[in-house]
Image: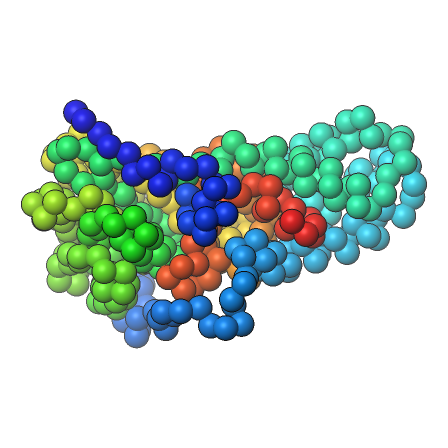
Amino acid sequence: MEMFRFCKFCLPAVDLLRSGMIFWRKDKDKEAPDAAPIVPPVQPDRPADREGETWVSRLGMGLGKSSAKLTQGLTDLITKKKLDQDTLDQLEELLITADLGPKTAARVVSEFAEGRFGKDIGEDEVKQALAETITRILAPVAKPLVVTKPDSGPFVLLVCGVNGAGKTTTIGKLAHRWIRHDGHKVMIAAGDTFRAAAVEQLKIWADRAGASFMAKDTGADAAAVAFEAYQQAKQAGADILMIDTAGRLHNKANLMAELKKIVRVLKKHDDSLPHAVLLVLDSTTGQNAHAQVETFKEITNVTGLIVTKLDGSARGGVVVGLADRFGLPIHAVGVGEGIDDLQAFNPEDYARALVGLKS
Ligand SMILES: Nc1nc2c(ncn2[C@@H]2O[C@H](COP(=O)(O)OP(=O)(O)O)[C@@H](O)[C@H]2O)c(=O)[nH]1
Ligand SMILES: [Mg+2]
């Protein structure tokens, strides 16, 4: 089977950053009734006050809340000249409160202490060293999403995550990237069939991005949507098919059954489907993101993560813990509600922003 690569995704993230191509770069009766779709206003051009902003500066501003805690803590902590056990213990606690989680905090502290114990240390040196250690943890998971279209049909991505994580928004951003920047033909399928508002919201994003859209009636079988969407996407010669899903985590049994059925039904078309299963995580949920990864890994073969809302999160440290614990690729990060606010994950920039260092 001949495959072709969407080569833009294979370029190193640094080149893409430089070139501006930053990206690769209810339970039924318990669910709230339909509300108006939550779709932020279109931003055709960036407002003037955002001109010249780089993603690092946006990330820095967002992570400012995370790093403020950490940097103030470091300033208070590094009062002694020599690095002793007491300082290391306090540093570990500080990293835990910065959402790295106990295991990762212990790892960071032990790597940091190596070769430095009993020696003179200054605040800036501590920040530099922490940034380097955190970069080492993040580097292996910073992997672009490589989309390879098989001859037999579109590349299929299943997008999962709990309600409110940012699935629908992320699908819109991905479609925009692939269509406007890379010229691909994209179809989006509304697998979150529970609420009419969810379908409507996805349709607005599809229109905005210029993607074709496939939906059935509210309450339709999500697996049937996926099955038919694949047929339609294939017929239409689409390069990429993205399938949105519901995220009713409080009814795990239903969620599990629904996602498993979508996968099973897709495999009737082709055993290699879906080609990627993206788990979207809201960074503001902090340590709860760990439980979400565990749950979705149990349900389905998660192939990569997209972490959202890093533009305003005080809990950016959670990304380090996730990388350390699960080792799942982090394909991109969400840094805003706009269509362009999806960026490649750069480990060094992230680590430096987190500890409050300018890039
Ligand atoms: N600030 C910010 N808001 C986001 C981001 N991604 C999504 N959102 C917002 O989070 C809310 C839930 O997003 P939605 O895509 O509907 O989540 P879904 O339930 O998983 O489909 C919406 O108000 C989005 O605008 C992000 O990266 N940054
Ligand atoms: Mg949604």
Left or right: 82 in relation to 103 = right
Looking at the image, can residue 298 be seen? no
Classify 222 as above or below 218.
above
* Residue 66 against residue 143 in the figure, above or below: below
Closer to us: 238 or 71: 238
Residue depicted at 21% across the width and 57% down the height: 211
Residue 67: where, in percent of width, then height? 67, 54
- Quadrant of the rendered structure where residue 33 is? bottom left
| Residue depicted at x 22% and y 53% | 188
Q: Nearer the viewer, residue 194 or 350?
A: 350
Tell me: 308 left or right of 269: right
Reply above or below: 303 against 115. below
At horizontal 42% and vertical 49% (from top left) the residue drawn is 21
| Coloring scheme used | rainbow
Tell me where residue 73 appears, x and y as whole percent. 77, 52
User: In the image as oriented, which residue stretches furthest toward the left?
Assistant: 235
Question: Could you tell me if residue 170 is visible in this image?
Answer: yes
Question: Where residue 113 sits in the image (x, y, percent)?
Answer: 78, 31
What residue is drawn where x is 52% and y is 55%?
55
- The x, y position of residue 239, in whole percent, is 20, 43
Residue 209 appears left or right of 96: left
